[in-house]
Amino acid sequence: MRDSSNKLSQFWQELKRRKVLYFLIGYVAACPAIIEFFLNASETFSLPEQTIRLLYQLSAIGIPVVILLPWFIYRKKKDDGESNIQATGPGEVVQTHRNNLPAQLTTFIGRAKEMQTIQDLICEHRLVTLTGTGGCGKTRLACEAAATMVQDFSDGVWFVDLAPLTNEDLVAKEITEVLKITESPNQPVIETLTEKIKDQKIMIILDNCEHLIKGCGEVCATLLQSVPGLKILATTREAMKISGEKVWRLPSLTLLDPKLVIDMESAQRSEAVLLFTDRAQLNNPEFELEPENVSEVVSICNKLDGIPLAVELVASRTRHLHPKKILERFEDRFDLLVSPDPGISKRQQTLQATIEWSYNLLSESERTLFERISVFSGGFELEAAEEVCSDDQLQKESVLDVLSMLVDQSLVYTMKGRDQSMRYNRLETLRQFAQQKLINNREENEIRSRHLQYYLKVAEVAYEEQFEAQLKWAAWHVAEQDNVFAALNWAESNSPERYAELAGFVYWFWRLRSDILVGIDYLEKAITKNIGKAESYARAVTGLGCFYWMTGDAQKALKFMRESLEIWRKLENPGEEAFTLSEISEPLLHSGDYETSLKYSEEGLEIARKLGNPSLINHCQIYLCTILVHTKQFERGRPLVEELLISSEKLNQLFSIEGALHLLGDCTVGMKDFKEGEKRYAKGVEVSYKHGNMIYVAFDIQGVAFAIAGQGRWAKSIRLDAAAREQYNKLGLEVDGMFEFWDEFIATHIEGARKEVGEELAKRYDEEGIAMGTEKAIEYALDFEKD
C-alpha cells in the first residue's frame, strides 16, 4: 500500500504541472493504480467502507476522482507525523522529503503565476537561473517553489547561501558543507562532491550568485555534466551564461494602473497592495486597508515599483505613520526604507544597502553608465544613451556593450519600443539611487545639459516634419514625453533660452493630444524666459494662440496669433506665415469677421501651394473647409471635406484626418443624413481616441448624440451629450457659444430630445451619461445597435 500511495503522490505532482490534455491522458493510464489505491484506502485512511465503495466504482468507470488524491495524501502525511521531513545529509539513510529549506516567518503573498513558471522550468531544464533586481523576492520565490517539489527529489532539496562568501574558489566547498560531505585531503573538493552525489536525484538551490558568478558557473557546469539526477535553481542578479542554462527574470509584484479608478475591489488585484496590507498588519494589528487609505497605499506601492523588499520595509512604518504621511515623506524614500528587524541580513535591512551591494559589483564603466542614465525619465533608446552618456571616460562605441552588461545584471531592463526598436528602462528606485551617485560625483549638471541638448535636437527635426511625418513623430513624442518634460524642467532654471526653444518645438504634439493646460503653462513661461531668439518667441506665441482658442477664449487667441503673424512676416518665414494665417481664421470667424477669416485662410493656402508642400497645403485646406461648415454651407463643403479626408489619409496626417471626419459628421447632420452622420462622428471618436486627441473625442461623442437624436433615439442622445459635456469639463473647455452652428445643433437635437422625454427622465439620463466616464462613453458611442 505504501508503494501505491507514493506512486500516486508522484503522479499527482506531475499532473498538476501539466496541461488539461495531458491530465486526461495520464488519468486514463493511471486508472489501474487508482483502483488499487481505493481497494486499500479503507485501511490506510480509516474511511467508511460505503465511501470507499463509491470512490472505487467512480474510478473504475473513468470519472476523475483523482482530484481528491491530494487531500488523501495530506491526511496520511499528517497521521504519519513530521518525523520523515528532516534536513539530513546525503551520506545518511535516505528519508522522505529531505531538505534544509529555511523556515519562513511570514506569509507568502501572490506570485501564483511565477510559482507555476518556476515549477515548469525546473521540470524542463536542469539549470534554472532566476534573475532580478535586488529585493525583488528571488530567494523567497525559489524556496517556495522548491518546497512544493521536495517529494520529486529522493536525495533532497538543499539550500546553499553564497552571500557570505568572498572567494569564488569556495563555492564547491560551501555546497559540500551544506550536504555534510566529508572532504578528502588528497582530492579536489569538486571531485569529492561529484563522486558523492553522482547517482543521486537531488536539487541544489544556489542563492546570491552574482558576486561569485564565474565560480558558480564553473561548479554548475561540472556538476551538471557528471550528475544526471541533479537540478540546480540559482538566484542571482546576473546570469552565468553557461551551456544549458535557462534564465528567467523575476518581475516586480503586480501593480494597479494609476490612470484607472482605484477602489477596494481593484486594490485586491495588486499583489503589492496585498503584501503591504499583510506586513502592515504584522507591525500594526489595527491597520486595515479601507476606502479612506486605499489610494495612498496604491500610490506607495507604485512609487516603490512593486519591489517586495521595499514594500515590506515601508509597510513596517505603519506602526507610527498613516499611509498619507508615508506618502508625503517619499522625497526621502531611502530613509523610509529601513528595517530594525535583527533577523534580516544587514544588506537587506535597508533597500539602499541592497542596491549598494549590486552597485559595488560593477566595473568602473558600468558604474559610470548606470549613474548617467539616471537623467532619463520613462526609458530611453540606445541612440539617446550614446549621445548623452558618452565622452572620453566612456566611449560612444562601448555604450551598447556596457548597457548590455547592466541588463544582464538586472539593473536595467528592455522593452519593446516604437517601430520594433529596443527600449531601455530601470525601476524608479534604482534611478533615484543612481541619480544621487551622479550628484555626489558632481556630474549631474553636465549630463543633464547633454540630455537637454539631445532632445532639443530631435524635437527640432520633429517640428520641421510634423506635417510630412506626423505619425512617426507623434509616436516618438508618446515614447519620449517624460524625457521632454524632464529636459524642460531642468532647463527652466539652468538654460532659459533652450527652455523656450524646446517648448516651441513640442507644443504641436501637446495640441494633438489636447494637453491644453500643459501647453499654456509651459509656453507662458517660455515667452518670459526667451532671450533674444525671435523664432523661439514666435513659436511659443503661436502655440499660446492655438491653446487659448481651444479653451474658447477667442480674444486671447487673436492677440497672440496676430503678434506671431507679424513676427513671421518680419522674419520672412513663409511656411510659418501660412500656418499662422490658417490658424487665425477660426477665432476670426468666431468673432464674426467672416471676410477677414476667409481672406486669411485663402492667403495661407496660396502660400502653401507656392511652397509646394503637400502636407502644409492639406493642413491649410482644413481651415477653408471649416469656414464653409461653420457658415452652414454643408452641401458645398461636403465634397471638399471628402477630398480632404482622402488626401489626409494618403499623407498620414492625423490632425487633418481627425478634423475631416468631424467636419463630415457636421455636413451630414446639417444635411439631415443622420445615419451617415452617426457613422462619421463615430469613426472620428475611434481615430481621435486612438491617437489621444481628447478634444475631438468629446466633440465627436456630442456629434453622435446629435445624429442619434435625429433618428429619434432620445435616451442615448441625452446620455452621450452629458458624457461629452463631462469630458469638456475635464479638459477645461467652454463650448457653449463657441460655434454658432454647433449651438444650433444643440438646440435642435439635444434640447429637442429633452422635450420629448420630459425633464425628469432627461435628468436621469444626464446622470447616467456623466457616470459613464470616458471609456464607457466611447464604447457606447461606437455601439450602433445599443440604445
Image: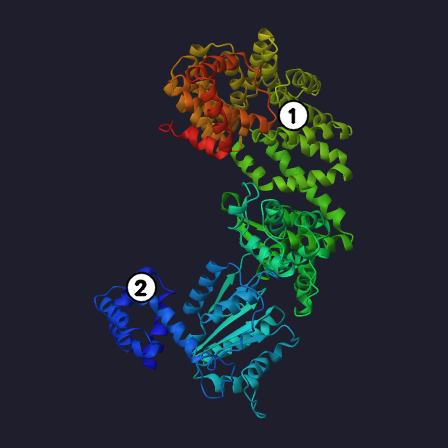
Could you tell me which quadrant the C terminus lies in? top left
- Residue 784, quarter of the rendered image: top left
Which residue lies under the disc numbered 2?
A: 22
| Count of labels in the image | 2
The residues tagged by marks 2 and 1 sit, at their Cα atoms, a distance apart of 63 Å
Q: Position of residue 435 (x, y in %)?
A: 71, 52
Look at the picture and state if 627 lies above or below 425: above
Image position of 50 (left or right of 729): left
Look at the picture and state if 273 lies above or below 662: below
Q: Position of residue 562 (x, y in %)?
A: 68, 16
Which callout, 2 or 1, points to the residue nearer the camera?
2
Please name the residue shown 57% across and 89% down the image: 183
Which residue lies under the disc numbered 1?
A: 543
Residue furthest out toward the top? 595
Q: Residues within 10 Å of mark 1 (few under 14, many from 20)?
A: many
Evaluate whether residue 222 shows in this view: yes
Kind of residue indicated by mark 2: Tyr
Q: Foreground: 316 or 404?
A: 316
Please name the residue shown 46% across and 58% down the image: 113
Q: Foreground: 111 or 374?
A: 111
Kind of residue indicated by mark 1: Gly
Residue furthest out toward the bottom? 186
Q: Position of residue 721 (x, y in %)?
A: 48, 23
Could you tell me which quadrant the N terminus lies in? bottom left
State which tag comes first along the sequence, 2 or 1.
Answer: 2
